[in-house]
Image (cartoon, grey):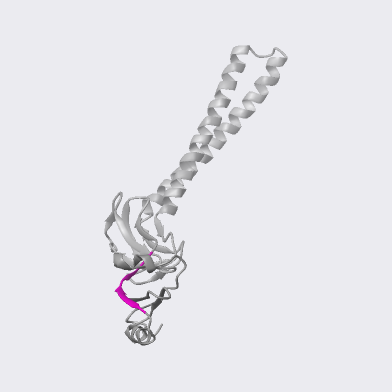
Amino acid sequence: DHVHVDMASAVLQVDQQDARAAAAAGEKVLLATGEFVPPVRSALVARVTGRVAKVLVDEGARVAAGQPMLTLETEYLKLDVARAEAEVARANAVLAEAESDYARKKELVGRQSVSPAAFERSQAAFEGAKASRLSAQAAFDLARQRLSDAVLTSPIDGVVLERKTDVGERLGEGTVAFVVVQTAPLKLRFRVPERYLGAVATGAQVRASVDPYPGE
């Protein structure tokens, strides 16, 4: 990438032709070589371990934030969800029965038709059933989240710089599957010799060119 600094007006010229024109006009021009740098570079790691079932993008592909990039095999994860859902249903049934028994014992103890000890056992069973219901729901939510995490998505709008996995490979904990970089905006990075730093000012215009896009 070519960067030309007009030290008189603090404007970067585009290419050698512009530099010669500026020099002919009596302006001092500095030619520098730099690079465009993505401000965000993201190494994507799957949240769950597993074997890759599908790779949906390749190197060079443009991706949007939230776009699926690969999926893991999900057969066992789906079984975990079904098992956890069944546990929630069972916990709901136990809770409903315990709540009904507690309500009945509470009414009877007020009439002194049941012993306080029996009432306390019913109350304890009711509280235990509520706790079991919460635990079962938490396990169900976790199983669903793990199933959702089997789809790896892009966190940013950008371009796939590297693809590091393929179908059938196992992604372990911390394994990087893709590297995605942001392409807009880009940062332009170049060096100015120390003796010219006094002529560079904040707010100066910068113009640069790259070989694939001459004149842009």
Q: Position of residue 101 (x, y in %)?
A: 62, 25
**Residue lying at 26% horizontally and 59% vertically, measured from the top left:** 169
Image quadrant where one finds the C terminus: bottom left
Residue 130: x %, y % from top left = 56, 31
Residue sitting at 56 percent across and 35 percent down? 93
Q: Specify the quadrant that holds the N terminus.
A: bottom left
Look at the picture and state if 178 lies above or below 111: below
Magenta portion: prevailing SS class = strand
The answer to if 36 sits in the magenta stretch is yes
Q: Position of residue 38 (x, y in %)?
A: 37, 65
Snapshot quadrant of residue 119: top right
How many numbered marks, from 0 up?
0
Magenta run includes residue 151: no
Is any atom of residue 175 visible in this view? yes
In this picture, residue 186 sits left or right of residue 90: left
Camera-side residue of 186 and 202: 202
Residue stretch rendered in magenta on the structure: 28-38
Q: Reply above or below: 23 against 124.
A: below
Task: Return the residue nearer the eye: 32 or 159.
Answer: 32
Residue 107: x and y in percent read 70, 20
Q: Is residue 115 left or right of residue 167?
A: right
The residue under the point 45% across, 73% down is 205
Residue beneath the point at 38% across and 79% down: 13
Q: Is residue 2 visible?
A: no
